[in-house]
């Protein structure tokens, strides 16, 4: 005679000695027959609702993790240029631009300036009688030498009584390449006039890939609001665009 089944063929629960019915699902205990495939203590699979809930939590976790990774890995650029008065944003390639045929760098300039002189290595931009910029370049990475050469190249008949304001130019950069510089106070003698006006002179230079670019900024001075106008440049933001939008050879 076959012995009664030990495990319930429906849920796999151990009937226990003398039990006529399964204590879990109530199935009658039958004698004989093949042993149940379920193992003792086996539990049923997750319900459909639990599966959906668990899958949803995993999806939310993955979305949050990917979002955090994207935020942490995104590139950050500090666009605060030497005057720190405006955020100029990415370079804007416009029609008004100078291109150095000798060194291959490019300078975008705003319509408030006029390109008055240019050579294979550099150029001059004029806004009015006492607001102008000069760009030049030399091979190599002698940044201090380029600054000194730019200072020596100032026309002493126009820029007079040069006095140091600062031996450091905070945020000095050219085309987003960090550089160094010096700032001066001076008097600008307008050609043909006997009077002069106070100006600030900022000279900066930066080196990149074997090329050094220097820029001289001469602008109307207002030292009464020195905190708001770094280095005393009354129209400092007008020069930021050209300095930041200098494109080095090989850069986009």
Image (tube, rainbow, N blue to C red):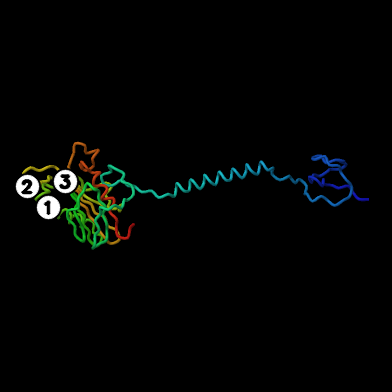
**Residue at position x 20%, y 46% from top?**
166
Classify 10 Å Cα crowding around label 2: few (below 14), some (14-19), many (20 and above).
few
Residue 128's tag is: 3
Image spot of residue 231 (x, y percent):
21, 43
Tell me the element at label 3: strand
Asked whether the viewer can see residue 230, the reply is yes
**Residue at position x 23%, y 42% from top?**
230
Asked whether the viewer can see residue 178, the reply is no
Image spot of residue 153 (x, y percent):
15, 55
**174 vs 21: above or below:** below
- For the residues labelled 1 and 2, the Cα–Cα distance comes to 15 Å
Classify 10 Å Cα crowding around label 1: few (below 14), some (14-19), many (20 and above).
few
In this rendering, position of residue 28 left or right of residue 156: right
Q: Sequence-wise, which precedes: disc 1 or disc 2?
A: 1
Q: Which image quarter is the C terminus in?
A: bottom left
Which of labels 3 and 1 is toward the front? 3
Q: Sequence-wise, which precedes: disc 2 or disc 3?
A: 3
**Residue at position x 19%, y 57% from top?**
118
Which residue lies most toward the top here?
224
**Residue at position x 21%, y 37% from top?**
225
In this rendering, position of residue 218 left or right of residue 207: left
The residue to which callout 1 is attached is 155
- For the residues labelled 3 and 1, the Cα–Cα distance comes to 16 Å
Q: Sequence-wise, which precedes: disc 3 or disc 1?
A: 3
Tell me the element at label 2: loop
Which residue lies most toward the front here?
95
Residue 192's tag is: 2
Tell me the element at label 1: loop
- For the residues labelled 2 and 3, the Cα–Cα distance comes to 14 Å
Image spot of residue 159 (x, y percent):
12, 48
């Amino acid at each position: 005679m076959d012995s009664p089944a030990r495990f319930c063929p429906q849920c796999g629960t151990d009937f226990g000695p003398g039990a006529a019915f399964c204590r879990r699902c109530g199935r009658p205990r039958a004698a004989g027959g093949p042993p149940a495939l379920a193992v003792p203590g086996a539990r049923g699979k997750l319900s459909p609702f639990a599966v959906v809930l668990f899958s949803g939590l995993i999806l939310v976790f993955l979305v949050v993790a990917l979002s955090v990774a994207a935020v942490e890995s995104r590139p950050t650029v500090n666009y605060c240029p030497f005057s720190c008065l405006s955020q100029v944003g990415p370079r804007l390639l416009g029609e008004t631009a100078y291109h150095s045929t000798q060194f291959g760098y490019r300078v975008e300039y705003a319509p408030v300036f006029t390109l008055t002189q240019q050579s294979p290595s550099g150029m001059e931009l004029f806004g009015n009688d006492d607001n102008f910029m000069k760009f030049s370049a030399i091979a190599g990475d002698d940044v201090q030498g380029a600054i000194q050469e730019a200072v020596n190249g100032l026309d002493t008949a126009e820029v007079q009584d040069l006095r140091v304001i600062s031996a450091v130019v905070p945020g000095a950069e050219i085309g987003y390449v960090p550089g160094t510089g010096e700032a001066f106070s001076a008097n600008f003698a307008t050609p043909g006039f006997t009077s002069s006006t106070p100006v600030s002179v900022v000279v900066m230079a930066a080196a990149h890939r074997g090329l050094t670019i220097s820029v001289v900024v001469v602008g109307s001075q207002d030292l009464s609001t020195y905190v708001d106008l770094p280095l005393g440049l009354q129209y400092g933001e007008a020069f930021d665009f050209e300095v930041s939008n200098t494109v080095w050879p090989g850069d986009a």
